[in-house]
Amino acid sequence: MLYNVLDMHDRATLPRPACERLPNAQLPLVAVQTRFPALPRLAERVPDLREALRRDYPMFSDEKALNIVIRDGRATTEEGNRILRFSSIDLQWAAILAEDFVSLETRAYAGIADFSGRVDALWSTIHRILDPQYQTRIGLRFVNELRHPEGDDYSTWRHLLNPELLGFNASEILGGSVRQTVSELVLERPDGQLILRRGFLRGTTVIPLPGKIAPTSGFFLLDLDYSDTTAGQFDSAPSARLREYNEFLYRIFRWAVSDGEYYGFLQGKSK
């Protein structure tokens, strides 16, 4: 079943390039998540889940989420829901499960075919063992942290990326040097909601794996999140929808990168 209605209703003027494998792709995190009404018997099925997932995700941790709560102007933390994390042996993939959602995250994205196939396999296992009946949200997210040898200064990105993505030239109009900028766009579309976060930052937005040192240089964030909050039956094989979301998000990415020097850098054709 295909979910996309874009061919009939889409008014986007984005280019339609074919998706390609970029040798220097800078994707520290790709994630998909489906949310569903809480499953109160999750704790009883943990042994079954560990057995079913041990080949692809043998590393297991049982965690508690920390929620930030603000009362009377004061921020405190409270213990949240139980979070089960099943990771690959190299920690590059993680299946994350709670009473009300399942996620798959990767730091080794190799294309939508491989990724969506893993999602179908994991979602099918969750459906078989936990039997969620409905879903309230499904979303696909790409966190691009674009880096370049000359990208430690914001002004450089005006030449490396599509200037329309960066907006007005603050340094030229206001004077001074831009140290940080970040913005968020929320857009309702015919088949879901798009959240686009973009800006110039330093360090990283992704928590590094154990033993890895977080980068400290400047980078341009292009965080793309496409989701649908239509309630319906739990979809245990959402790969068709993910491929369509991926196609549209890639169109945004290619518009943002344009066809200049930075695109050549991602292709491995320049420094």
Image: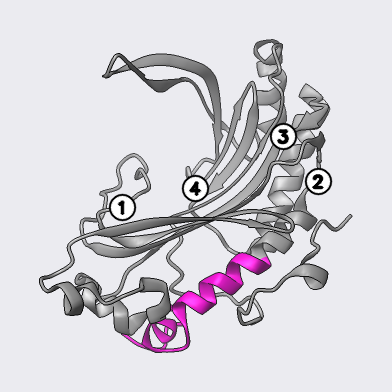
For residue 193, side relative to residue 178 (left or right) = right
Q: Is residue 78 magenta?
A: no
Helix or strand or loop: what does disc 2 sit on?
A: loop
Identify the amino acid type marked 3. Thr
Q: Which residue is mark 3?
A: 136
Q: Amino acid at mark 2?
A: Ala
Query: Gap in Å between the C-alphas at discs 3 and 4?
Result: 27 Å
Q: Quadrant of the rendered structure where residue 165 is? A: bottom left
Dot 3 crowding, Cα within 10 Å, few <14, some 14–19, many 20+: some
205 or 212: nearer the viewer:
205
Counting from the top left corner in percent of width and height, residue 94 is at: 55, 40
Q: Secondary structure at mark 3?
A: loop
Quadrant (top left, top right, bottom left, bottom right) of the C terminus: bottom left
Query: Which is more foreground, mark 4 or mark 2?
Result: 2
| Image depth: mark 1 or mark 3 in front | 3
Q: Quadrant of residue 103?
A: top right
Specify the principal SS of the magenta part.
helix
Label 1, label 3: how many angstroms apart (C-alpha)?
A: 30 Å
Mark closest to the chain's N terminus, 1 or 3: 3
The answer to whether one can see residue 61 in this image is yes
The amino acid beneath tag 1 is: Thr
Q: Which residues are magenta?
A: 247-271
- Cα gap from disc 1 to disc 4, whole angstroms: 17 Å
Amino acid at circle 4: Gln
Name the residue tied to disc 4. Answer: 92
